[in-house]
Image (cartoon, rainbow, N blue to C red):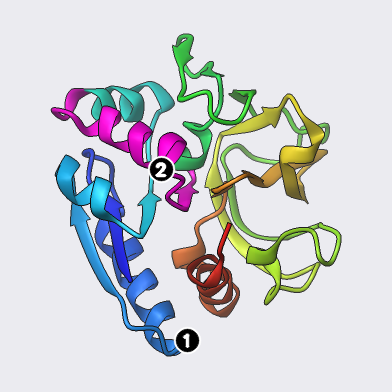
Amino acid sequence: MNIVVIDYGSGNLRSAAKAFAHAADEAGMAAEVLVSADPARILAADRLVLPGQGAFADCRAGLDGADGLAEALTEAVTTRGTPFFGICVGMQLLATSGFEHRVTPGLDWIGGRVEALAPSDPALKIPHMGWNALDFEPGRHPVLAGVEPGAHVYFVHSYAMTVDDPAHLLATADYGGRVTAIVGRDNLIGTQFHPEKSQAVGQRLIAGFLRWRP
């Protein structure tokens, strides 16, 4: 299996790559994990991973600024159906638009908006940082097969995605109201939390993605 972690100037690439390599090894899968911005490698990948840290607009600019990268990613994911995993801002970029500092178009692969968190409890701090429990229906998605409802994962974010179609919302967390934790459709899945920082639960989720045949 050829897994490409997309390099577009965002942070956390190496730790994401290490987590995917470890999950593949633990699951007994032969896999090569590359960090790359090369359009040819992206088009040849069996799995694509888009991590993301920082502001929505900056991440989108980084994606668009690498020569041929956005075009290759779109070709691979939307035309060829390559399984795709977005992490944190990499998940948010799936939305139609982001509203961090200014309105920025997203990839619009999962209709929705990325807006500032507004917990109902004013005592809750922004960013939402730390461990929180996942809420989802068992059997909701094949990638979640190894994860139990209530499992804790690690979040760091100040903005969150609201999906247009409830069918695309796979899991939530509670932070002064329901917060999108996992989205997905077709060959796409994305997590607001960081699976590479979520210890055993994150590893099981990554392994589920690597086994997935959408």
Q: Is residue 199 magenta?
A: no
The reply to whether callout 2 and callout 1 are in contact (CB within 8 Å) is no
Between disc 2 and disc 1, the foreground one is 2
Q: Residues within 10 Å of mark 1 (few under 14, many from 20)?
A: some
- Tag 1: residue type? Ala
Q: Is residue 70 magenta?
A: yes
Decide: is 140 above or below 84: below
Q: Quadrant of residue 201?
A: bottom right
Q: Quadrant of residue 132?
A: bottom right
Decide: is 203 above or below 209: below
Residue 211 in picture, x, y percent from top left: 53, 72
Q: Residue at x 28, y 28 (%)?
A: 71
Residue 69 in picture, x, y percent from top left: 22, 33
**Relative to the observer, which residue lies in front, 35 or 46?**
46
What span is colored magenta in the figure? 65-88
Whichever of callouts 2 and 1 sits on the residue coming sooner in the sequence is 1
**Quadrant (top left, top right, bottom left, bottom right) of the N terminus:** bottom left
| 190 with respect to 40 (left or right) | right
Disc 2 versus disc 1: distance between alpha carbons? 26 Å
**Relative to the observer, which residue lies in front, 184 or 121?**
184
| 82 with respect to 136 (left or right) | left
Q: Residues within 10 Å of mark 2 (few under 14, many from 20)?
A: few
Q: Which residue is mark 2?
A: 80
Q: Which residue is mark 1?
A: 27
> Looking at the rendered structure, which numbered label has been put on residue 192?
none
Residue 199 in picture, x, y percent from top left: 52, 76
Q: Residue at x 28, y 22 (%)?
A: 61
Residue 35 in picture, x, y percent from top left: 21, 57
Q: Residue at x 81, y 65 (%)?
A: 139
